[in-house]
Amino acid sequence: MSGFADFDAGHRDLITVTKFNFYGNRIVTASSDHRMKVWDQKDGEWQLTDTWRAHDAEIRDASWNGPFTGQHIGSVGEDMKCKIWQEDVTQPPNSGRRFRSIFRMTAPHRHPFVSIDFRNIDLESWLAVITRDGFLMVMEPVSPDTLADWQPLDQFRVCTAPQRGEETSFKVQFHHDPTDITHSVLPSSDRKSLSLVVAAMDSVKVYRTDASRRFYHAIELSSHGGLEVACIDSKHLDVWQVGFSYAGPTLGTGLFIGSGQALAAGGPASLLGSYIFISVLVYCVSTAVAEIAAHLPSQTGTMVNHTYRYASSHLGFSLGYLRWFSIAALVPFEITNAMVNLGLWNPGARLAIRISIVTAVVFFFNMLPEKVFKRSEAAFTALKLVTTIGLIIISGYLAVRGVPESAARGFRYWHEPGAMNEYLTDGHLGRLLGLVQCILCSTISFIFSPELIVQRAEQVDSESVRNALDMTRIDCIHLFALYILGSLAITVSSPSDEPLLTNHGIGAGLSPYIVGIRRSGIPILPTVATALIFLSSVASGRSFLYISSRTLCSLAETGHGPELFKVRNDYGVPYISVIISALFSGFAYLSLAMSASVVFNLLMYFITTSGYISWLFSCVIYFQFRRTTALQGFTPANQTRIQPYGAYFGIAACTFLPLANALLLAAPSWVVARNSIPAYISVSIFLLLYFGHLMKSIVTQRRHQSEELRKQGCGDMLEKCTARPQG
């Protein structure tokens, strides 16, 4: 349905309230006629579901609760009452009995309630109401299993009580945006605390909860010239917010260096086919994850919460920490990437000094205040984007025009040495193995892109911009277009039999872009390109340390890790998590014991195998999500045509690729076979995390059962001892 739709609400007096539900497919209307109506959108039209008398006076406000505790509506009226209504789907539509009152509360101080709002975090709910004289009450359920019984969390007056006869205006609203509205001003505050915005006469006040769950006055806006504030919208009260692409860290670096080995293994046609294949795979996984995120937006949903909600605590624990240490391992990978790009392939003092300098720079940026880091992130992402596009343009120019005194290259390297290379064996099987190896080497360019792209979409309020699914699809298309063009440019830049691409068969070597520019003979340009790729690697390293440390901090904030990990300094930096995540940088010093080209491969295969596991279970969680919502009677409003077939494809591909990597252990060459060892390590760590958490849960459960039995046994003995003898 497009445009505006008009329909007769059928109320007998002025309509005072119109509110959409979470998904925008239901409307509640209330009126001065004391009645409320609920409308459902069906076949492009709004159809009346039920009408009932809700209050004994004019209804002042109404609000939907979140969709995960059933369908509930809160209402307040001039009859001094606050009521919560629960839908009873067993009652027929338009019977006047479909919504029944499960809770009612009378306003204190003989002043009616004038505004109401709900707040949901996962399955928890909070209720805020304010009276005509500015008395604010925040309530929470006595039990999370029912909304029929509430208890006060905090209550206070937001301003001096108005004089009798004075015109008043009060509105209350929770802050529903996943991004904390006061964190920029008070970065040390708890991100999980509640935020309220209150319109109190001619000013706007923001309240937050402290460590003891009491509200304190955080911010006040009073620039309305003495006029009363009649409307507030907390989604647009962000003090400062910079949105940057969470896919930025993965941009370019894998394409610059990792594509060299992929080109050498499979040839230009296999390289282009690999990037197209992985783009399709990442799109399937991303849209599956995005459907879950669009159904229940959460700041840490993709990386942490959704696995716990729709799968199990054991899988949530193992997958959450797998993503943390794998993204943390990308920090030494990017440092090694930078060294390989500089041609520092062999161990030595020069290499140790440069690794130390880059590590210190990465750590220094992550200890900066969050606002400073996020502002610099946009600049570094722009640098990588310009570098990627610039190298594509230069490669295309050299292929079409060539350089003076030399012929244009065109697609010459597709014929000499050939479009597809043979790998490990001859014939069609060798070319197939070359394609598979090309896919394995190319995955590093896309690793964790689905999680990071959807997480970026989760940071943005879906009601003010596109929803998470639309944002994910657009970001995927942009990223895939850039990567496929980049891979095509590589195929015309360097021949696949260039020894420098693999450091003469040892491992990672020079970027195909650098090889192509060197072959052109243009002075200075190779140095500039090398410097830009080096800066891109450093920029990605600092971003991956930021993401890994925040993932570890989120695990602690959601109760899945030690509280020490969520400790922040005055600048909002979780420095303990940063330090722990930064310890992974030590793996870059393996280059002092073996060639940096070999270390590059060991880290790459470890990270890509972890990425396959993350993608595989993301698709599994998607099916659990569909099953759960179907059982609860929900129909997700945001769906894609490619699902669920895309999730089936994701499961098949992410099962086959790690197995293919593991089978390389049987390869006749040790140089090839050793690349499968990191795959076994990654899978082993994941299984240890999963079964370790499972065993801990079993032991804890049995301990609790033993304690209950012991208490019960002691109680029986005490009862026998105190019983009086009969007769």
Image: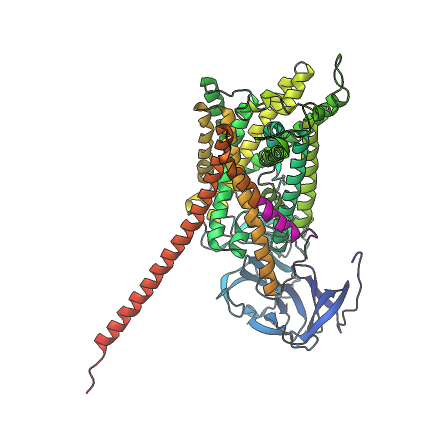
Vertical order, 178 against 153 (above or below): above
Residue 598: image location, x then y, percent:
50, 27
Of all residues, the one furthest to the top in this rendering is 405
Q: Is residue 642 magenta?
A: yes
Identify the magenta region: 637-654
Question: Could you say which quadrant of the image residue 253 lies in?
Answer: top right
Q: Quadrant of residue 429?
A: top right
Q: Percent from the top left, x then y, of residue 573? A: 49, 39
Is 464 in front, or is 13?
464
Q: Residue at x 57, y 43 (%)?
A: 656
Residue 216 lies, with reference to residue 578, above or below; the image says below
Please tell me how many numbered marks the rendered image carries. 0
Q: Is residue 158 at least partly visible in the picture?
A: no
149 with respect to 59 (left or right): left
Residue 306 visible (yes or no): yes
Q: How is the image coloured?
A: rainbow
Picture coordinates of residue 76, whole percent (x, y): 62, 68
* Residue 504, above or below 382: above
**Toward the viewer: 356 or 396?**
396
Residue 15 inside the magenta-drawn segment = no
The quadrant of the rendering that contains the C terminus is bottom left
The quarter of the rendered structure image containing the N terminus is: bottom right
Provide residue 579's location: percent of width, then percent of height.
Answer: 44, 36
